[in-house]
């Protein structure tokens, strides 16, 4: 690999001769491992021109290093890093004994403290990964995705993608979401009511920051999505955690004075229960009369394969109280990082301005690639394939759960997981640790609850990243672990 | 296009017959323009199965709509939206007269208020766009970029890209930045000292939120990048705006009690001046002794073609006080939305946790595509091409400026713009408005200054998005406008 001329600097105020400065920089690059055997140095002419030094200065530095075996020189091919340097690579020297800035004084650590530490990054190495929210790459049509990327990067389309879009989104993607995605949830929206986000996490954050960034009072479901609790911890809001029952959030428990309510009405996270129609009406009536906003996280609607889904809460929202949070993470793939908000234009304008401050806009290349993936029908085909496979896995899993005498804690119309209860006295954190040794990953219930201990008797088993063939053995291992404990 | 079955819903609690509900939904889809002539409806069998109604119910609804010309039916091809519906498409009905939530009560509008409104989204329609920070698509190697995207989307590499990476970054990209990009700025960093961001804007925001989110005192250059001032307005920090001179920020003007200083040392924004070595040393000495952090926005280092650049401030940072903000927006393309931070690991861990809360991580597909673009040498080639073209444009522009008697306000080692002064008494906002009618876009100086009026006598002329051939005519039009005013 050629070493760029920009890797070198000259300090003209230093008493060290220029030739020596250059030699030192080459030696440092070698000993620190940045320059590797065979890497080609800039020609002495190019280097001299760039640094503004005499060519002979560079030539002398090179010649000197060739005699000490740092460089080799071949006729017409210039100087390269020698392959006899192996023994000279050292770990970087420890920093000299200068006083360091005391960063602890500047950083209160509240973000790092509130972040989850229980997620297993190398989940692929486990044979029975009942992990939630990760994709099964076998189900993603990566050939179609690649074709769409190539189409998005054709010359005509590429030009607008190179631009800083300021606050705008790709009109083609917005149009497709308005005309083809939202109607599946019974939602009608105009372009100014839709904002693209960097995934649902980003949508929830934007909503929380706009509505609660300076304080206020909000309500969340208990248990709920742990990422939401982390987001709210960043704001100055007072948070009421309202226990859910088998029909989700009971609207009559929402305390007076609350200005914002977060709900996963169609698919409660993590219990998977669906809020019935009468309760939805009651929730929206209360929102109108008490004057609170409802943030609906519709995170997994595409996976309601066990029966026709009901429309989103947003579809019944005549008073315009609902901010709808959608995502393509489950249906396309989680690493995509694209989602959307649907809400009143006043809210969307404010969230758009905040998004602009924080990151401008989601990358144009991804927006356009997704627009093609949707409009060419790949999304529908992939969705159908996923639903078929998930439905099969769910049946296999339900059977294995019954056969092994494990206890599901609630039902639901599909989704990608079971919410499970433990026999009294057992702790899902201990069970989870024990099972890792068996190659089994489960998710303890504790991070979902406002009071972690409330979740010790629960765990989540997802089937989105484990094949049907492995499910019975994985479940059997959970039973074995339960017997041991 | 086939209409997905998910676009339809049945409300079983409604007194309206199921068949009528279905008909109404199809008619609404047509009149609202969501369903278009030729769109195919799901088969009656599929629809009945999905909605859980009798097949005859669906068949009746379809037959009824065929007699009223909403649908056409062809043997073996099912029902499609008729092409005789043209006159029936209406604008969506106004919302019924329900009370709406009063969003103004929930939203204080501080983000929308602080966002810039002077940016021209359709700048491409102007013949002489002296706009800053947008790419010239002719200079971007879009074929190479597309090849890199295709490579990143091959099956083996695609698997990790589909995943939710939690807090991680692509190790290949981090490695490349550490070994090949940062050394060009004289910076040595280990992987745990580097964090990917969604562009420099996102990097500045993360730094501001971590260090100043709960208040504090900071200093910025005056004039400075307007996006930074917007970011700081979001925090609770007290901001001191320190006037720059021809050598950038004078360190002796930093008031006591400041905990964070923002600087564009290598390329002051917008004046383009470069901070000399002795002033850099004085700034870092002060940072060590007063204990403040320095945020270095090195936004345009690749474009220092008019002489060898000096190393970054971060390269001299023995005490570890500097947070370095880098970006690929100028050197790859602005719509990419990828940049990076280099800082003390304590800071990086906290910023990483904050990034996770707000958006998880920059999309994996972009990270890997960029890693290929860099490591295959396309970045260097593109950089060289850009520098050559910009250097040429700069010469043409300097000549045109001199010939037309315009006044540059400061110099610099290249970059992509000139910072210009107006004759006394003139206002660059009025000049900018006047020039739009002539097809010329310039940037008034006002948004750059803490007190907007201070910038009325300045304007910025960028040459990154205008070809050399158009520059003389564009400059001549500026002179003509000045004569008129």
Image (cartoon, coloured by chain):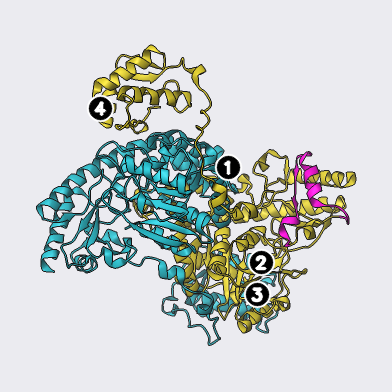
Chain colours: A yellow, B cyan
Residue A316, by quadrant, is bottom right
Element on which disc 2 rests: loop
Q: Could you tell which of marks 1 and 3 lies nearer the N-terminus? A: 3
Q: Which residue is mark 2?
A: A264
Q: Against A76, is A132 above or below?
A: below
CA distance separating discs 1 and 3: 40 Å
Q: Nearer the viewer, residue B2 or A439?
A: A439
Residue under label 1 = B160
Indicate which label's residue lies in the foreground, 2 or 3: 2
Nearest to the eye among marks 1 and 3: give it: 1
**Same-chain check, marks 1 and 2:** no
Q: Secondary structure at mark 3?
A: loop
Residue B80 rendering spot, x and y as whole percentages: 51, 68
Please say whether residue A441 is one of the residues in the magenta stretch: yes
Q: Earlier in the sequence, mark 2 or mark 4?
A: 4
What residue range appears in magenta? A423-450
State the CA–CA distance, disc 4 to disc 1. 47 Å
Which chain is mark 4 on?
A
Please name whichever residue, B483 or A204, is drawn nearer the observer in this view of the structure: B483
Of A363 and B158, nearer the camera is A363
Q: The disc numbered 3 marks a residue on which chain?
A: B
SS at badge 1:
helix
| Dots 4 and 1 on the same chain | no
* CA separation in Å, label 2 and label 3: 21 Å
Give the foreground label among 4 and 1.
4
* Distance in Å between CA atoms under marks 2 and 4: 66 Å
Q: Which mark is residue A53?
A: 4
Residue B10: mark in rendering: 3
């Amino acid at each position: 690999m050629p070493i760029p001329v920009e890797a070198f600097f000259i300090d003209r105020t230093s008493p060290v001769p220029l030739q020596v400065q250059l030699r030192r920089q080459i030696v440092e690059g070698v000993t620190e491992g940045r320059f590797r055997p065979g890497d080609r140095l800039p020609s002495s002419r190019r280097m001299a021109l760039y640094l503004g030094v005499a060519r002979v200065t560079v030539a002398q530095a090179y010649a000197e290093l060739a005699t000490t075996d740092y460089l080799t020189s071949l006729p017409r091919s210039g100087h390269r890093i020698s392959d006899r340097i192996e023994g000279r690579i050292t770990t970087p020297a420890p920093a000299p004994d200068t006083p360091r800035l005391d960063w602890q004084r500047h950083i209160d650590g509240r973000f790092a403290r509130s972040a989850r530490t229980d997620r297993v990054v190398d989940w692929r190495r486990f044979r029975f990964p009942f992990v939630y929210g990760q994709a099964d790459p076998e189900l993603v049509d990566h050939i179609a995705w690649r074709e769409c990327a190539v189409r998005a990067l054709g010359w005509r389309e590429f030009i607008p993608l190179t631009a800083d879009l300021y606050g705008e989104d790709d009109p083609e993607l917005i149009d497709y979401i308005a005309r083809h995605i939202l109607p599946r949830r019974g939602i009608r929206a105009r372009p100014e009511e839709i904002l693209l986000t960097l995934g649902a996490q980003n949508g929830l954050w934007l909503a929380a920051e706009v509505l609660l960034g300076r304080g206020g009072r909000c309500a969340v479901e208990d248990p709920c999505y742990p990422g939401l609790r982390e987001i709210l911890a960043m704001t100055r809001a007072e948070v009421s955690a309202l226990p859910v029952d088998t029909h989700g959030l009971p609207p009559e428990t929402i305390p007076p004075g609350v200005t914002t309510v977060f709900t996963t009405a169609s698919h409660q996270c993590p219990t998977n229960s669906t809020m019935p129609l009468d309760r939805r009406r009651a929730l929206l009536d209360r929102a109108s009369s008490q004057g609170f906003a409802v943030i609906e996280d519709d995170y997994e609607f595409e996976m309601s394969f066990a029966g026709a889904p009901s429309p989103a809460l947003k579809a019944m929202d005549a008073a315009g109280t609902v901010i709808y949070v959608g995502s393509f993470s489950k249906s396309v793939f989680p690493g995509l990082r694209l989602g959307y908000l649907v809400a009143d234009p006043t809210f969307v304008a404010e969230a758009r301005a905040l998004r602009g401050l924080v990151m401008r806009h989601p990358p144009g290349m991804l927006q356009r690639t997704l627009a093609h993936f949707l409009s060419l029908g790949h999304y529908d085909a992939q969705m159908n394939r996923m639903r078929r496979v998930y439905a099969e896995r769910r049946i296999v899993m339900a059977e294995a759960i019954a056969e092994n005498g494990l206890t599901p804690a609630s039902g639901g119309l599909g989704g990608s997981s079971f919410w499970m209860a433990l026999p009294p006295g057992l702790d899902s954190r201990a069970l989870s640790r024990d099972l890792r040794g068996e190659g089994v990953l489960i998710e303890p219930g504790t991070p979902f609850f406002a009071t972690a201990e409330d979740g010790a008797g629960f765990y989540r088993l997802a089937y989105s990243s484990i094949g049907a063939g492995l499910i019975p053995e994985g479940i059997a291992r959970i039973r074995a672990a339960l017997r041991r404990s």
